[in-house]
Image (spheres, grey):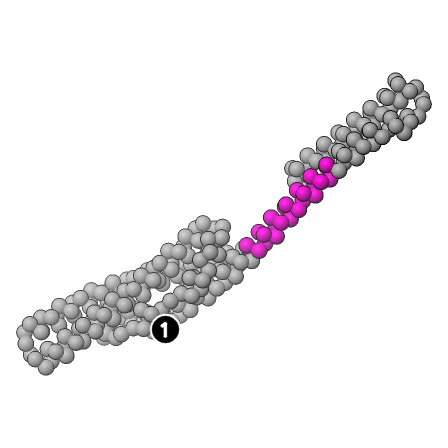
Amino acid sequence: MRFIERLCITFYFFCTCFVLIKFPKLIIEDLGLQILNTIEWAPWAQAVGSVAAIGVSIWVSNRNYHNQRRIEQERIDSEVKHTLDALYDEVNFFLQQFNTGLGQRLNLLGIRGTPFLDEFTPYDAWDFPIFDGYKNSIGKIQDRELRSRIIKSYAQMRALLLSFSTHNRLLAEFSAAAELYKKSGVQADKEKVDFLREELIGLSTRLRDTWRSTRDACLMLIHDIHSQRQDT
């Protein structure tokens, strides 16, 4: 039983005891063994009724307040649960798309094939509708560590996609320079091709490292969301 409810009941109990003790005293001292007349009883009955009404009013008001708080908390808990479920699916889909294609090619850089990523990627146009649409709900997650991990993981995913956009632009410049040198045979054009090639190698290496750290962050986030769902 909550503190305010106990306080109201205790207050009502003491008032009742006071009346029950006071009445016999009035009967004995002032009226002997005569029954109090109706006029003398009326103020006491009214006082007892007022005290009881106040006590009940406080108790009902406090109970309604806590019921409203409980209903609101249940609504927030349900909203957070649906948010975590949606984020879990979005991050998991992101990992599956990369693991089955581009992620594997990045892991093979310098081992098999060219030393840089020699294909254009469509991932620079990737967006995250779940995260963007549930930002307010993410702020209601009580687990501060989980909330922070969500934000950091999505920041890493966006940074990875931004790097792919840079890669596509650099690869387009490299392809155009290589085509120009193929036609001209000019040394200056060859030097530009070599320069862009080195830039692509460096960027591809950074892409591979960024992908690996992003993958690890996403896997950890999925694990934490799964644990949170089991706890609830």
Q: Find disc 1 in the rendering and name its residue.
A: 100
Quadrant location of the C terminus in the rendered image: bottom right
Residue at 82% x, 25% y is 21
**Furthest residue in direction top, as rendered:** 29
Q: Position of residue 35 (x, y in %)?
A: 93, 25
Image quadrant in which you'd find residue 115: bottom left
Q: Is residue 139 magenta?
A: no
Q: Position of residue 214 (x, y in %)?
A: 34, 61
Query: Residue at coordinates 25% horizontally, 71% vertically from top-left?
Result: 168
Kind of residue sitting beneath label 1 = Thr
- For image coordinates 36% across by 73% down, the residue present is 100
User: Can residue 67 be found in the magenta stretch?
Assistant: yes
Counting from the top left corner in percent of width and height, residue 34 is at 94, 23
User: Does 197 appear above or below 225?
Assistant: below
Q: Is residue 161 left or right of residue 79?
A: left
Q: Which quarter of the picture shows residue 112?
A: bottom left
Kindly give the residue lying farthest to the bottom in the view shown.
183
- The residue range painted magenta reads 54-77
Magenta: main secondary structure equals helix
- Relative to 56, does residue 98 appear above or below in the rendering? below
Residue toward you, 153 or 37: 37
Q: Is residue 172 above or below residue 64?
A: below
